[in-house]
Image (spheres, coloured by chain):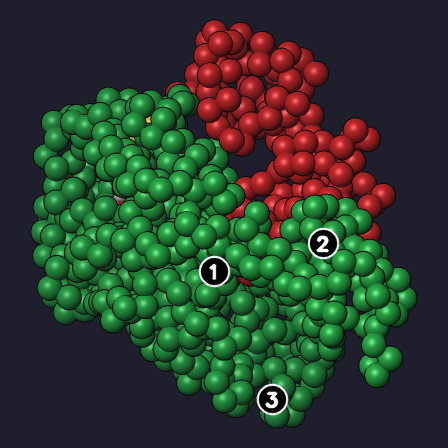
Amino acid sequence: MKHVEDSTHINSRGTVFVCGGTGCISSKSDQVRAGLDGEITRLGLAKAFEVKFTGCHGFCQQGPIVHLEPEGILYTHVRPEDVREIAESHLRDGKPVERLFYRDQVTGAPIPYHRDIEFYEKQQRVVLHNCGNIDPEDIDDYSASGGYESMRKALLEMTPEQVIEEIKHSGLRGRGGAGFPTGLKWEFCRKAPGQEKYMVCNADEGDPGAFMDRSILEADPHSVIEGMTIAAYAIGATTGYIYARAEYPLAIRRLRIALSQAQQHGLLGHSILGSGFDFEVEIKEGAGAFVCGEETALMASIEGKRGMPRPRPPFPAQSGLWGKPTNINNVKTLATIPVIISLGAEAFARIGTAESKGTAIFALTGKVANDGLVEVPMGTTLRTIIYEIGGGIPDGKRFKAVQTGGPSGGCLPAELLDLPVDYETLTQAGSIMGSGGMIVVDEDTCIVDFARFFLTFTQAESCGKCAPCRVGTRKMLDILERITRGGGQEGDIDKLQQLAETVRDGSLCALGGTAPNPVLTTLRYFRSEYEEHIRNQRCPALVCKDLVSYYILPDRCQGCMICLRNCPVGAIRGDKRLIHVIDQSKCTHCGTCLDVCPPKFGAVTKVSGEEIEVPHDPIPVSPSK
Amino acid sequence: MTQELAEILAPYKGRRGSLIPILQAVQAKLGYLPEEAVVQIARFLGTPESEIYGVLTFYAQFRTSPVGRNLVTVCRGTACHVQGGARILAEVERRLGIKEAETSPDMEYSLETVACLGCCALAPTMVINTEVHGQMTTKKVAELFSKTKGEGQG
Ligand SMILES: Cc1cc2nc3c(=O)[nH]c(=O)nc-3n(C[C@H](O)[C@H](O)[C@H](O)COP(=O)(O)O)c2cc1C
Ligand code: SF4
Ligand code: FES
């Protein structure tokens, strides 16, 4: 995956890359790195190998990840205890450690090289090309892989108008959600009258369940700074802000390091590269409000106010931060800019579909075998992403739905798996492309509960400015909560539908405008599951707590007393070698008994909409057992 | 405290849009935003206190009461929800004997939730102080809290 090999920098030594993303660090990759350093010194291999930290590969579930270049061998789930074996067997004796190879999800066969792993093989990493392959805290690594060349070209060889033309020509559309053509947006801002203009990077990544922007910021922060500087040059801004999610401390730290390195190398600041163009960037940390991802709310927040959206027009390009023309782009949009300048607009536009150019980056999570960061050409089908790259649904479960676009998006059923992902197709299906969240759920997820979950989020995050959003989402949530508690009534579905339309059409910003999407799509594609809840008080997925009951099966129970001791409310009666009984009136449906019952007995069962015949009082376990 | 606060505020003198960074810096230092601090910030910025409260209550990040010695944050994001995050939160609440947004009477623990940590591939997730824990199970919750208990700042 490495592009340019800079001989002064990498020379003939092998490099051991240890992932230093948030995910891998949480599984102790920092200790793995320190261990490898120590072992290499101990074995006298420092001339042959160096160890480097990288940012997130986007394969976090397999972490900590260690890979060796130029060989291309990848190790998964590397623990500090494994370090010695890697060093002695692989680095010293040249024998790779097979037990740490990635295993094929279906056949279980070990796969030594990352290029052969389906998760990577089926991807086209254009924007993410550096992620996992360079040290994000070392500007020389970025430069060695062609970094800052696009900026050099834009600032020294192109006029701002030419840059805008190139981006327009590439067909790039904003990756933050709405998909507005980036070149056009820049042109509005460029043409807006005024000397002082602002360039803002939206790194708020508010979609809960998505981590594309975090991964890029952690793994390749310079690409965002480079894209942002080119954008600033194009629109004529001399001050930039990166509005970053406070919950991402590592991303913010890496950004700070990258900014100061760029400054030291004359790539930011006064007369960048001698071009006469000045640009300064400041980081603003968000403070935990989803609505601040919306452009006008984001600007209010940077100004130090409550982050409430305001009507548009005036558009930010006319009157934005402190009343000056302002352009806002998402992290991925900006990270794509250097790629377009370097490949050329035409080559970029050959990737993707007629209306959606380039690649789409998704954070694939939920019930898929390979969770992670996925970059594919626009127009790739959901099936390819979920089944070929994602490896399908684990544990022999059945696919139920895929949610794209987070709380603003929709939930699509199995029948639509062959849809290509592009802006228009997903919108037609009732969902949105969104910023890149893609969550797969299987038969164990209740669709009504899933819709309730999203509404809980948007209801809590509504800034309260407009009544349809503030009151409407509350009313929708009340109905959904009632249905999941078994109090659904005939007519609830119609009411939900009407409220959804009112909220969608009567809200000022897209938070309210899109909040009903999860409800509308689930009503459209999974109506029968709502009806089961409402008419039969049954939750087919066995999720809605008030609609399920737990029973201990008399022919399985061995009277071992484990569940009895663990039940937090003392709802289980029994004794040694007596069949246990759950007191249904005391049971709080917490599911602890099901968790603790030894699998070899499997005596606890969960049902919805039915009763199971069990003894009233504990009776002896049958002696034959 | 006034002196300490003055030192935090000094670098923001005359800078636009500094209210939120100031609140963040003060909270980072004191753990929360006590009334006296708000009074002093108001004076420093020449803004009415009411306006400062208007801003700080708008954002989920800000606290107006002190936080326990250990801050436990459970993710309630979509990926974590799908992987059973609600059970993790319930188990943490049961173990610590406090609910979301509460602090234990002995000031040992505070419990909060967060919309997403961005470690969704490791769902369900939670954070104790600054350490992220992934692929949580109710059993891991039990182990973590028998370890952390009594260790103080851990
Ligand atoms: C409620 C709401 C939340 C949003 N959150 C984000 C976000 O977290 N990150 C983002 O880039 N865009 C977000 N957006 C979209 C932005 O408003 C804006 O369209 C985007 O940053 C523009 O950048 P782009 O043209 O590069 O896509 C959000 C929009 C709304 C209405
Ligand atoms: S639609 Fe909702 S979030 Fe948007 S401005 Fe109105 S109340 Fe606020
Ligand atoms: S949803 Fe829990 S970490 Fe993202």
**Which residue is the site of mark 1?**
A540
Q: Three-letter amino acid code at disc 3? A: Glu
Q: Is B90 in front, or is A496? A: A496
Q: Is B114 in front, or is A357? A: B114
Q: Check the rendered structure and report the hue given to chain B.
A: red
Q: Check the rendered structure and report the hue given to chain A.
A: green
Disc 3 and disc 1: Cα gap in Å? 43 Å
Do discs 1 and 2 share a chain? no
**Which residue is the site of mark 3?**
A98
The residue shown at (74%, 56%) is A582
Q: Chain of mark 2?
A: B
What x and y, as percent, mark residue B127? 64, 48
Quarter of the image for residue A389 reads bottom left
Disc 2 and disc 3: Cα gap in Å? 32 Å
Q: Is A22 in front, or is A260? A: A22
Q: Three-letter amino acid code at disc 2? A: Val
* Disc with the residue nearer the chain's start (3 vs 1): 3
**Helix or strand or loop: what does disc 1 sit on?**
loop
Quarter of the rendered image showing ligand 2: top left
**Helix or strand or loop: what does disc 3 sit on?**
helix
Q: Nearer the viewer, mark 1 or mark 2?
A: 1
The residue shown at (62%, 55%) is A549
Q: Three-letter amino acid code at disc 1? A: Pro
Q: Is A352 in front, or is B145? A: B145
What x and y, as percent, mark residue B92? 70, 46
Quarter of the image for residue A416 reads bottom left
Q: Nearer the viewer, mark 2 or mark 3?
A: 2
What x and y, as percent, mark residue A188? 12, 37
Report crowding for label 3: few under 14, some 14 to 19, many 20 or more residues within 10 A (C-alpha).
Answer: some
| Mark number, residue B141 | 2
Report crowding for label 1: few under 14, some 14 to 19, many 20 or more residues within 10 A (C-alpha).
Answer: many
